[in-house]
Amino acid sequence: MQGRAHIRLASDFWLGRTSTMHDRAFIHLKMLLAVCLLVNTSCTTSINPSSTPVFRKGVTLAGNITDFTANNFALLQQVLKTGSGVIGVNLPWNAATMDCSAGCLARRPANPMNWDDPQYAESPAVQVLDAITNYVAQNGNGAFVLGITYATPGWAACPGDPADPAQLAFYPPQNASDYGDFMYAMSERYSGSHISDSGVPIGKIRDWVVYNEVNSPAWWRNTACNVQNSDPVSYYVGILNQAYAGVHHLPASAGVRLLAGAFASYDRKSFDGTPGLRISTNYSDWAMNTADGDANNAWISPIDFVQTMYADGAEFDAIALHPYAPTIYGDALDQPPAGAVSLGNIGALLTQLKTLYPNGQNRQWHLALTEYMQQSYYDPQSDGWDHISAIPCPNYFCAQTSEANLNSLIQEAYGPRGSNQAYVDYLIWTMWNNVDSYVGGLVRADGSDKNEGLGSGSIRETFSAIGQ
């Protein structure tokens, strides 16, 4: 997730994403505790219907997720009024097995395949998601919820991996079956046929993401249990296939999809878009640099990752991708560096999927763009902006685009040369509002419109008009 939004870590978390590869790992884990503490104190446009079901725009609910359930779901109502067809919500595995009755610690459920096991039912993260799915089902005008899963809990981890939960979250589980049990239970819970212990009807989750940016060394690390020195794809395919079986265990799962990868494009090191962590374009390159202990070259091309997933027999319903632009203030459709996949060359990944899966028109050919945004410039509040950087200039954010320019970039991203094409099912903007210290939201941190240089218009209004 380059330079994007989300949350924080162990001392205040519900896990979102950060700006740099390493920091955003910590941004995710911060929100979890925030939810725990708060709860206890908490346009669809058809395109080529013969080849793709629907084109949708979406929004991820970032920041303090309980804000979206407060005041009779006032913020969520605003999101839905834009015509957003997909509402992305994070459900970290460690958060889903965490209750705050005794220290907010993740624990193994007594019956991990039971959708209503107390360890799930009493999780603040699960309770908030219950409420959101119910509201979207009742008031979403056809919108659906995307569940974004990741974050290995300590009880499921390899004993040799770091003890710090903030670090441990980004390692594979010791046993893939544990994650499969979790996805079995969650797909049952969010099948649209249950009522929570508190009497809330639980809505349906249609799409599930299996972990986050697994082609990145910050999000998918080499576990100490990897005594055979297997590549990271084989570990991922192991849990992916367990999750696939878990999600598709019910007749009610017809139409529910499991999304693989959530592949990152690449990491930008500096404000001018220079790549930071170079992406390896083939496995020999990756293996050589990894063997040398050079983490700066450990990213794997989405193209190469998908090729190896195919060879390993991966089961999935669509590919999730984060097709960030090559620069934080440039054209969303610019060509990225070699090995990366952005909106500007998304056809390369589509072509590969059609070659690998010649009969995959109703499944594997589809791309869900589950995370995307570009930042809008901020400055001191005395100049009328809504955010002050905690990082002194010059820095990664100083060259961000204006709100007026961001308005144009949004239209490019959702246009016919961007995401509005066959087999691209939707593009999710990662944030509704700015979340300190990231300013990629559709509105400012206080909910006011981004309208600098736009006259009587605003970015929110432009987003609302997309697809209409």
Image (spheres, rainbow, N blue to C red):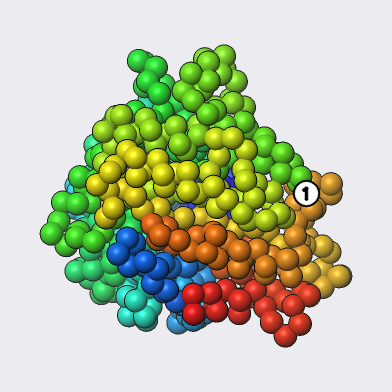
> How far from the left and from the top, in percent, is residue 249?
16, 51
Q: Residue 224 lies in what quarter of the image?
A: top left
Q: Residue 375 lies in what quarter of the image?
A: bottom right
| Residue in the picture at 37% in, 20% down | 230
| Residue in the picture at 44% in, 32% down | 304
Q: For this rendering, which residue is in front, 168 or 150?
A: 150
> How far from the left and from the top, in percent, is residue 126?
35, 60
Mark 1: which secondary structure?
A: loop
Q: For this rendering, which residue is in front, 182 or 350?
A: 350
Q: Amino acid at mark 1?
A: Ile
Q: Is residue 246 above or below residue 54?
A: above
Q: Residue 101 lies in what quarter of the image?
A: bottom left
- The residue that label 1 is drawn on is 391
Q: Is residue 240 above or below residue 42?
A: above
> How far from the left and from the top, in percent, is residue 97?
34, 49
Indicate left or right for 12 with 49 as reference.
right
Indicate left or right for 144 with 197 as reference.
right
Q: Is residue 93 above or below residue 304?
A: below
> How far from the left and from the top, in percent, is residue 451?
72, 76
| Residue in the picture at 77% in, 74% down | 452
Indicate left or right for 144 with 29 as reference.
left
Q: Is residue 36 visible?
A: no
Q: For this rendering, which residue is in front, 256 or 69?
A: 256
How crowded pointer 1 is (Cα within 10 Å; few <14, some 14-19, many 20+) is rated as few
Q: Is residue 139 visible?
A: yes
